[in-house]
Image (cartoon, grey):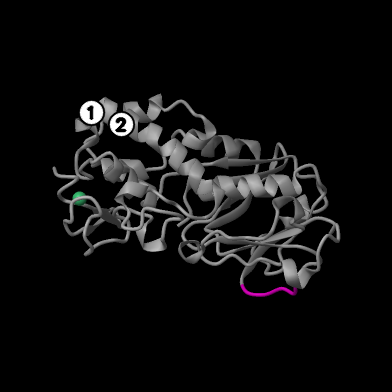
Amino acid sequence: MPEGNEIHRWAERHTKAFVGKKLHVEAPGGRFADADAIDGKTLKKIHAVGKHLGYEFGPDAILHVHLGRYGDWTEGVGELPPVKGALRVRLSRKPTGRAAADEATTRHGWYSEDDGSTSLEPADVDWIELRGPSDCSLYDREQWKKLLARLGPDALNGDDPEPAFAKIARSKTPIAALLMDQSVLSGIGNIYRAELLYRARLSPFLAGKDVPRKTVEAMWNDSIPLLKAGMVDRRIVTTLPKHRPHSEGKPLKPEVHYVYRRHGKPCWVCGTKVQRQEMAGRSLYWCPTCQAE
Ligand SMILES: [Zn+2]
């Protein structure tokens, strides 16, 4: 599932490509009924909050997109390609003719398999297509406000973390579940929660109220550069070079995480087998030695 880094990355790319321009908006699959309401309008601004994107065409015309587990954007240059797959919506501008469609069209793979390499400069993107989101609908300002009200602070938006610290300090819920709770913190998903906990050498099972305030602050501070680094490409790297078997050069794919999806393998730091367990319907990964209870 895309996490905050990915959402902010799309917002940044799409802003460079489309903000200030009149866009052609269409939903050829018929699964987004309000495309006509924003078709031909100028895109004013793109909001990124946690795992939510908002393409603002007017105060009461905000295209809300939540990618969910399977949603993804495809981008390309030139004329629109033929309609394929479960296309939810596509946005395009008048092509500037910088490159031929065939050569420059980039189709991103699913998040986990994608190394983030793209030859496409955001300013060159002429169209984007959305498939598989958990939501794509038109919000008015009240709906957008309600959404913001139920989301916790987003580290990539420079939000004040105090409301999140306060919620954690009075909660009996395990810290691993709190980090994923979007009403506590927004933007953190399964990879970042596992890796932030490891980097803090914190047991995922500790109740929020039992985590020292200093540790919670340290995790928040740690999340900012990690999330920002994850915006550069679609890769999240959390290991320090000194902990990787290959410490020189670009990190190798199996060495980018400490614990995420490394169950059964030895911890890079202590050699203990990394564990996996279900928590609130999602897999949790941790090192029982480095993150002892
Ligand atoms: Zn360990």
Q: Which residues are magenta?
A: 81-85
Specify the quadrant that holds the C terminus. Answer: top left
Give x and y (percent) for residue 112: 45, 63
**Amino acid residing under circle 1:** Pro
Residue, x 42% and y 51% (percent of image)? 237
Instruction: Residue 12: tell me if it is visible.
Output: yes
Q: Main secondary structure of the magenta part?
A: loop
Residue 175 higher or lower than 138, as above or below? above
Left or right: residue 1 versus residue 233 is left
User: In which image quadrant can residue 29 be found?
Assistant: bottom right
Give x and y (percent) for residue 96: 85, 57
Give x and y (percent) for residue 140: 65, 41
| Residue pointed to by mark 2 | 216
Residue, x 45% and y 54% (percent of image)? 249
Residue, x 36% and y 48% (percent of image)? 241
Residue, x 46% and y 60% (percent of image)? 69
Residue 212 is labelled as 1
> Is disc 1 in contact with disc 2, using a CB cutoff of under 8 Å?
yes
Q: Secondary structure at mark 2?
A: helix
Q: Secondary structure at mark 1?
A: loop
**Amino acid residing under circle 2:** Val
Residue behind label 1 places its C-beta within 8 angstroms of ligand 1: no
Seen from the viewer's position, the closer of residues 246 and 145 is: 246
- What is the CA distance from the residue labelled 1 to the residue labelled 2? 7 Å
How many neighbours does mark 2 have within 10 angstroms: few (below 14), some (14-19), or many (20 or more)? many
Residue 186 part of the magenta-drawn span: no
